[in-house]
């Protein structure tokens, strides 16, 4: 059963066995496993319930409806946009449906550095099988690859570089190109179309427009969840909600899971809570191609091809180097990549059909922390503090130079990125300018779609927040199953890694239920 906030007219008091907080990648998987085990399960999701008919493909409507802070959440210095979904299905509703596993080298790194001996490829194999089946993961069909993405593959093939077509969780995709705005064709197999409806069929009650504020510990090892029904859009408080339960599964994402735990006073004894955040910052590059080379980046699967020649899976933190991925589908946002106004902007927009867009992804070491700001309502709010390391900056510049060289090789006439002070590069002999690229607040806008790590797994509370079964170190029966548990960046895309980790822990828990 799905109950939307506007269907609730009075304060609510409920009792259940398990409460799942958040309905995205981790929350959907947890809700399904709890319900499948026959446990009375309630899911609380702060965002609204939207369906295919509501996804109108307009950025100005869909960003406020589906994204945390309307897509304007940034690090405290304003330098990195941190995109997260906030709706029934979480970020799986607005993502580009690329399905990548946790890199073997990353698992190896976690075993070596953090002693996580249970997280082996063998131990995760059954979870991959279950997750891939539920999501219909398969290699993208050729007919939905667009010219924008294929440019990467063709150029890489010519240069002898490693590149490939993504696997994806789609079914009957028509290649509309609107993945970032929610799929109006029910093709993208997010948790909104898979795990959550199945959990609901199995008896789970899913409340949308209900924000969890804090958790209270009751006598006898039980818990009371304090939440609020909020108005859709403004998210203003409407009615209080209290739910008594035996088990809580946190899946509010890397920023909000630790905030709820902190508000509940559960940070005592968890020195790593809110720390060790990876953002995997990326920059969008736009390359104006010859007029005859139409890219039509707004149609087809937005992100379907990667060029991985410069990945470094032996990096100190398991995933290093840099890679390029084609990307499209957000004309409003991407039109800023040239960071121009007036006549220059008009000129670049006239070139839009023959402009190639790709993201330069540069994996990072965990180098962010949540800072707590006390609001006037007495509630703590999380702020994302993040500092680019010198090593990352140097790697970024190497990556940018390589990507620009690559794009000139592909035929680019002009390359732009989202910096108001760094003008276009118009020929390969200008590449040395990248050494001076301004990686400072106000000088460039980077983006993160893969925030991870504020409740990382560790063998004890000195080094981590949860154990290898994803249970809090300091309290029984509270689990965390979202992106926050990753010790370091898991992959270049995080949905499947989160789901697989959640599946392993929740399947095991359900078996013992
Ligand atoms: C634009 C974009 C594109 C992406 N593309 C890809 C891709 O192609 N492939 C890929 O693998 N990954 C991609 N990702 C990343 C991937 O989707 C996320 O890493 C993943 O969904 C995160 O899962 P999660 O469970 O941590 O949180 P989410 O899926 O973000 O879900 C968290 C949910 O918790 C809710 N919540 C938060 N606070 C509260 C509260 N107090 N009370 C109740 N509910 C709360 C939120 O509203 C949200 O719905 C993309 C992400 C974005 C933003
Ligand atoms: S390209 Fe269009 S049809 Fe395909 S998954 Fe994305 S939004 Fe849905």
Image: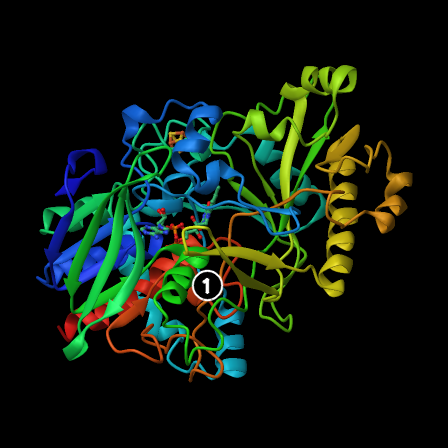
The residue indicated by pointer 1 is: 102
46 shown above or below 511:
above
- Residue 362 left/right relative to 442: left
The quadrant holding residue 219 is bottom left
Q: Residue 487 location, x and y as percent? A: 49, 70
> As rendered, which of 269 and 174 lies closer to the eye?
269
Q: How crowded is mark 1: few (under 14 residues within 10 Å), some or many (20 or more)?
A: many
Seen from the viewer's position, the closer of residues 465 and 437 is 465
Q: Is residue 309 above or below residue 37?
A: above
Q: Up-down: is 114 above or below 175?
A: below
Q: Where does the image place residue 166, in percent across and percent down from the top left?
A: 48, 46
Q: Where is residue 136 in the image (x, y as percent from the top left)?
A: 30, 46
Q: Is mark 1 on a helix, strand or loop?
A: loop
- Picture residue at 41% right of the left edge, 77% below the top: 268
Q: Which residue is drawn at 53% across and 63% down?
A: 489
**Residue 110 against residue 187 in the figure, above or below:** below
Q: Can residue 60 be seen by looking at this rendering?
A: yes
């Amino acid at each position: 059963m799905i109950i939307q906030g506007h269907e609730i007219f009075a304060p609510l008091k409920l009792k259940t066995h398990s409460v799942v907080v958040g309905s995205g990648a981790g929350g959907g998987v947890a809700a399904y496993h709890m319900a499948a085990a026959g446990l009375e399960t309630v899911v609380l999701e702060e965002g609204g319930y939207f369906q295919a008919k509501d996804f109108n493909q307009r950025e100005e409507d869909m960003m406020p409806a589906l994204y945390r802070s309307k897509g304007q959440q940034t690090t405290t210095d304003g330098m990195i946009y941190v995109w997260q979904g906030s709706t029934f299905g979480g970020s799986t509703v607005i993502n580009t449906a690329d399905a990548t596993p946790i890199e073997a080298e990353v698992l190896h790194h976690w075993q070596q550095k953090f002693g996580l001996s249970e997280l082996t490829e063998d131990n995760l194999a059954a979870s991959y099988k279950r997750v891939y089946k539920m999501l219909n993961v398969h290699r993208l069909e050729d007919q939905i690859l667009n010219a924008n993405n294929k440019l990467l593959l063709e150029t890489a093939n010519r240069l002898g570089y490693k590149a490939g077509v993504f696997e994806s969780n789609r079914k009957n995709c028509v290649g509309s190109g609107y993945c970032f705005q929610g799929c109006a064709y029910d093709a993208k197999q997010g948790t909104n179309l898979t795990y959550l409806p199945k959990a609901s069929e199995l008896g789970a009650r899913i409340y949308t427009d209900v924000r969890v504020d804090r958790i209270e510990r009751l006598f006898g090892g039980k818990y009371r969840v304090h939440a609020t029904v909020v108005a859709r859009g403004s998210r203003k408080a409407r009615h209080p909600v209290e739910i008594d339960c035996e088990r809580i599964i946190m899946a509010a994402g890397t920023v909000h899971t630790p905030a709820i735990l902190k508000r509940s006073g559960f940070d005592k004894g968890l020195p790593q809570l809110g720390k060790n955040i990876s953002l995997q910052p990326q920059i969008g590059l736009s390359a104006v191609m010859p007029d005859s080379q139409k890219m039509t980046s707004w149609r087809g699967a937005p992100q379907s091809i990667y060029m991985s020649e410069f990945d470094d899976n032996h990096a100190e933190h398991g995933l290093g180097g840099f890679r390029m991925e084609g990307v499209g589908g957000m004309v409003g946002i991407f039109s800023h990549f040239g960071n121009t106004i007036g006549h220059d902007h008009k000129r670049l927009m006239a070139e839009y059909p023959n402009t190639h867009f790709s993201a330069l992804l540069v994996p990072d070491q965990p180098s962010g922390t949540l800072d707590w700001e006390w609001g006037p309502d007495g509630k703590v709010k999380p702020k994302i503090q993040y500092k680019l390391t010198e090593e990352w900056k140097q790697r970024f510049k190497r990556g940018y130079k390589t990507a620009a060289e690559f794009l000139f090789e592909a035929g680019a006439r002009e390359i732009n990125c989202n910096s108001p002070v760094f003008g276009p590069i118009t020929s390969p002999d200008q590449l040395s300018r990248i050494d001076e690229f301004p990686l400072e607040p106000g000088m460039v806008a980077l983006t993160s779609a893969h925030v991870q790590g504020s409740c990382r797994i560790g063998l004890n509370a000195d080094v981590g927040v949860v154990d290898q079964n994803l249970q809090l170190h300091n309290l029984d029966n509270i689990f965390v199953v979202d992106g926050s548990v990753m010790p370091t960046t898991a992959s270049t895309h995080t949905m499947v890694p989160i789901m697989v980790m959640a599946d392993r822990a929740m399947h095991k828990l359900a078996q013992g239920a």
